Amino acid sequence: MSSPTPMSAPPALARLDPAATEALAQRVRDLLAAGLTQDAAHRLAREVLGTRKRATGPAGTPESEKVELAFWVPGVEPGGRLADRVGAFRLELWHPAEPLDVAGMRKGQSKPVRFVRQELPVVAAGPCLLAVLDGVAMGCRERFGPLYWLAYEEDGRRFVVRDPLAQSCPFGVYAPYELYDVAGLLAGRKDTDYFK
């Protein structure tokens, strides 16, 4: 049995941006102020839920991006079945311990991969759990981004909340999802005029 390869410098970990997270939570509260109408649900799904990259500075560096994550979790709203457990929910990020060779991966191959696990708190707003992160290098054609999902414990058992709006599932639907820069992918396409 071979010894594990030494880990290079640990990956830069994400930071929760409390002010931006609260601003996102307020946006959700404003959308739902008149109740969960069909229009509010449509806008929530289109404008908030899922993962989104927001540019905040010079392009090309992780520091230039904020990543918004918004999960629909019925029961976390006030009076809901999970309302008293909102503090138990954690956003789990799985950062590749060393850069993964995207180009060298081939269908059908398997290779052990090491990750550094990070837990961050989330904020509740209505039936949503939210976080806005700084310093996250989202995945793209050249690199893998961190993987993510929500997790919580109840009655001594661990549960995972999956993201039905995940945009990249490199390890399948039962593994954590990848934070992927879909907007960047689409911006780089040469055939976008065809789809307009």
Image (cartoon, grey):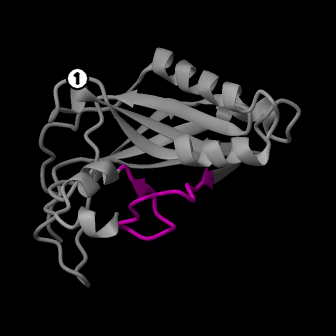
Q: Quadrant of residue 118?
A: top left
- Report the residue at 55% width, 26% height from top: 24
Q: Quadrant of residue 107?
A: bottom left
Of helix, strand and loop, which mostly describes the magenta segment? loop
Q: 115 or 161, which is in the foreground?
A: 161
Point 71% across, 41% down: residue: 40
The residue under the point 72% across, 45% down is 39
Q: Is residue 87 visible?
A: no
Which residue in the structure is indicated by mark 1? 57
Give, as a three-letter code, the residue at label 1: Gly
Instruction: Tell whether position 33 is magenta.
Output: no
Q: Is residue 168 left or right of residue 35?
A: left
Position above or below: 77 against 39: above
Could you tell me residue 93's position as x and y percent? 41, 43
Q: Is residue 5 left or right of residue 93?
A: left
Label 1 secondary element = loop
Instruction: Name above or below for residue 59 compared with residue 18.
Output: below
Tell which residue pokes out farthest to the top in this image.
19
Which quarter of the rendered picture does the C terminus lie within? bottom left
Q: Position of residue 147 (x, y in %)?
A: 38, 51
Label count reads 1
Residue 99, how many percent across, how many down? Answer: 16, 51
Please state the extent of the stretch shown in magenta in the rendering.
Answer: 160-179
